[in-house]
Amino acid sequence: MIGIQHSDIVVIGGGIMGAAIAYYGSKAGLEITVLEKSELASGTSSKCDGNILAIDKDPGFDSQMSLKSQELVHQLDKDLELSFEYRNPGSILVCENDAEMEAANQWVSKQVEAGLSFKMLDRQDLRNESKYFADDLYGGLECKTDSTVNPYMMTFSMFHSAEKQGAIIHKNTEVTSMSRNVSGEFLIETTKGQFTAKRVVNAAGVWAPLIGQMLGLNIPIVPRKGQLIVASRQQPVGLRKVMEFGYLISKFGGERSVDLLTEKYGVALVFEPTEAQNFLIGSSREFVGFNTKVDYKVIRQIAKRALRFYPQMADMTVIRTYAGLRPWTEDHLPIISRVDEIPGYYIAAGHEGDGISLAAVTGKLIEEMLSDKETCIPIEPLSLGRFRQEVVHS
Ligand SMILES: Cc1cc2nc3c(=O)[nH]c(=O)nc-3n(C[C@H](O)[C@H](O)[C@H](O)COP(=O)(O)OP(=O)(O)OC[C@H]3O[C@@H](n4cnc5c(N)ncnc54)[C@H](O)[C@@H]3O)c2cc1C
């Protein structure tokens, strides 16, 4: 029987958030222990794409946070020992009608005004980009700073360096309950014995609310299922990330002129060539609880949508399909926050479809909070408290 194990800081969750926190935390000399109920990256961080994007972020705080993360990932590519297939070719959004071109124009103007590297693309630019695009696409827009990684490898790579810097990682160790003693220390029961900690970081993705409930804390995160198709390496369809403009509408909510099933399953084209030139083709957005079973009705719709933009893909071979759960919050921003009523308790979860993009800045922010440093970007918009604004009834 193992005795009680103590650590200054316990991080719950071995996904990409846990990895980034363990990496930046241990680099700053903090004593970090990670508890993961299964294998590292066994949650959403291995059931996703690997895009580090600013192109789909609201101009303002949202895109500035992404830019900061892009900068940090660029540096991680130099600093981490294990390569994680980082590439930095930019990304594009394509438009299929005049209304989308008009909206894209406005999106680009706002982003350029905010100082980001965006530009419009015309029909000819799309033809130069890929001969596989449908002929009737109107054009699109480009964000130069966007990059791509292998999310699974990035998670492992950060954990690998974190361990070398002194972090301790316990896999197959599920947190089953938590309490606090009179001196405010956390007592954490797990399937592998008891841990104590002065501070706890809840980085459990879609499971963060369950960890919160252990201390009576309500964390408003809901799983939003997404499915992807993996195509085999065959022809060089494209060298960088492509999304349809309707993806923005699907993500943030709004009217699209698509058929009923495309709308129902929240399907919008996402095309990502991996380093090995396999293609990830997505994706869907559905609120169906914790169900991660692949639904072939949805997959069929994703394939149909991809053919609208890349008709020649009809002849290509599919290797497999998978589904993951995005940790969704109502305002599409993550919760990276202290919890006022539980001193020493922090949350780093709720990144929806942006967790790979925002993991680095999240790890850095949590390290800065734990070290009582000034944070690299403002943290007020990310606080748990923003969901608790009192409703004033007239
Ligand atoms: C289809 C799809 C495509 C996506 N594409 C992109 C993209 O291109 N770019 C992007 O930025 N983001 C993308 N995302 C989103 C991104 O994958 C997530 O935001 C991110 O992986 C969340 O990471 P996490 O560490 O918070 O959660 P997770 O990776 O789920 O990690 C949480 C961990 O906590 C562990 N855990 C849970 N309960 C316990 C417990 N009781 N005890 C111990 N451990 C526990 C889990 O086992 C899990 O490993 C996509 C998501 C999906 C589904």
Image (tube, grey):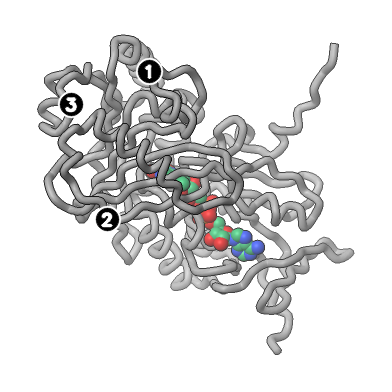
Q: Which amino acid does label 2 sit on?
A: Ile
Which image quadrant is residue 143 in? Answer: top left
Of all residues shown, which one is farthest toward the right? 182
**Residue 238 visible in the picture:** no
SS category of the residue bearing label 1: helix
Quadrant into which the C terminus falls: top right
Picture disc at residue 390: none
Quarter of the figure that contains the N terminus? bottom right
Q: Nearer the viewer, mark 2 or mark 1?
A: 2
Mark 3 is on which residue type?
A: Ala
Looking at the image, is mark 2 or mark 1 earlier in the sequence?
1
Q: Which residue lies furthest to the front in this view?
A: 297
- In the rendered image, which residue does mark 3 sit on? 134
Residue at mark 1: 107
Residue at 59%, 51% (x, y): give it: 290
Secondary structure under badge 3? Answer: loop
- 3 vs 1, front mark: 3
Q: Residue furthest bottom?
A: 1
When asked about the image quadrant of residue 146, the answer is: top left
- The mark that comes first in sequence, 3 or 1, is 1
User: Which comes before the other along the chain, label 3 or label 2?
Assistant: 3
The local crowd at label 1, few if under 14, some if 14 to 19, many if 20 or more residues have their Cα within 10 Å, is many
Q: Name the residue under label 2.
A: 319
Residue type highlighted by circle 1: Trp
Residue beneath the point at 55% across and 47% down: 365
Residue 368 placed where, x, y %? 57, 50
Nearest the viewer among 188 and 130 is 130
Where is 49 relative to 377, above or below?
A: below
- Residue 64 place in picture, x, y as percent: 45, 31
Residue found at x 64% / y 42%? 221
How packed mark 3 is, by other alpha carbons closer than 10 Å (few <14, some 14-19, many 20 or more), is: some
Give me the residue at 26% from left, 21% from top.
140
